[in-house]
Amino acid sequence: MLPAVNGSIIRVEHLYKSFGNLCAVKGVSFDVEAARCVGLLGPNGAGKTTTLKALYGMCRRDPDTRTSVDVFGFDPDRDELEIKCRSGVVPQDDNLDSELDARQNLLIYARFYGIPADEAHRRIDALIDFLELTEKGKARIKELSGGMKRRLLIARALINNPKLLILDEPTTGLDPQVRHLIWDKIRRLKEEGVTILITTHYMEEAFQLCDKVIIMNEGRIVDEGDPAELIRRGMERYVLEVIKPEALRAEGIEIDVPGLRKETVRDATFVYSDDPNVLQDVSNGLPAGSVHVRPSNLEDLFLRITGRKLNDS
C-alpha cells in the first residue's frame, strides 16, 4: 500500500447539487486528512452518496462560484481521471461481472489501470489473500455469498494501490462475522496509510472505525467530530430503554420521571440521565426484564439529531 500523505487530501466548500427541483446537497463543507477514516452518516435521502459521487466525478456539482471541491489537488469536474487513478471506490450496489470468475473481475480492472500482467497477477494474489478469498479465486460471481462479493468489491477497489478508498455502505446486509472481518481489513488499510471515506447506517460501525463522523440530514451537515466526543457533548451519559413495553402496559404502569428527558416513539420509551443510579432506581420499580439501563451510544445521538421519523424519499 502507499505511504501516508501529510495534510488534508479532500477539501469541500459550499457543495451544492440539485436534481431538477430537488436540492440533494445544500452547502456542504468538510475536509478529510490523510490516513484517517471519516464517516458520512445520515438517514436515507440525506445526501451522503451524492456527496461521495461529487468527489470522484460521478456527479457534477451545481455551477456556483462559491463551490470548491479539491481531491489530491484536483477538481473532480475537470480532472476526474486524475482522481480515479489515485482512488478506489466500493459502490453501494454489486456491479461485478457475473459472467467472469473472481480473479477475472480483478484482472479486468487491472487492465483498466494499465497494470502489466505479471504485476497484476501478483497484486491479485495478495488481495485475494488479504480479503480471505483464496479458495474462491476461480469461482463464478453467482457462486459467491453476499459477504464474499463485498470483499471482492473491496479487493477490486484496491487493485491500483489507492491513496483514497471510498466505501458506500460496505457491510449492509452482511452477517456479524463478515462485518467484523471487513472492519479488521479497513483498520489494516488505515494503518498502512490509506485514507478512508465511508457511508454507513450502522452506528456501531462508524464508532468502531471512524476518527471523525459527519452527520448529514436533508442535504446539510448538522454535526461533525470525533464519535466519542460528539456523544459526550450531545447526549446524557446513560439511557433507560423500555425493552418490553407490553409488560408495563399489562400492569398499567406509566414511566414519568420529572426532571429527566423522556422520549416515547411508537411503542418505545427512552429516559436519559447523566446519573446511572437515578435510572437504576426507576428500573427497580418496574417489572423484571422490561427495561434496560445502558450507556448512551452514537445511535442515540444520531436519532436525537436527525429525528426518529422514517424518511422513505
Image (cartoon, rainbow, N blue to C red):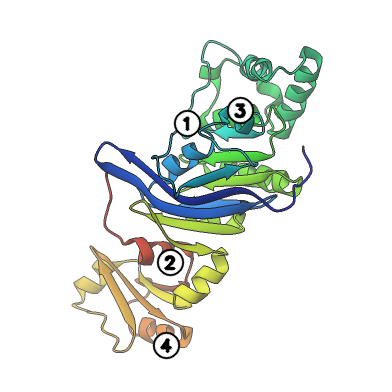
Residue positioned 66% across, 46% down in the render: 195
Give the left or right position of residue 163, taking residue 256 as reference: right
Q: Which residue is mark 1?
A: 58
Q: Secondary structure at mark 3?
A: helix
Percent of width and height locating residue 161: 72, 32
Count up the numbered dots.
4
Q: Earlier in the sequence, mark 1 or mark 2?
A: 1
Q: Earlier in the sequence, mark 3 or mark 4?
A: 3
Q: Which residue is mark 3?
A: 152
Distance, label 1 to label 4, CA atoms, is: 52 Å
Check the image and report above or below for 94 versus 47: above
Distance, label 2 to label 3, CA atoms, is: 33 Å
Circle nearer the viewer, 1 or 3: 1
Q: Which residue is mark 4?
A: 278
- Amino acid type of the residue tagged 4 in the rendering: Val
Check the image and report above or below for 142 versus 1: above
Check the image and report above or below for 33 versus 92: below
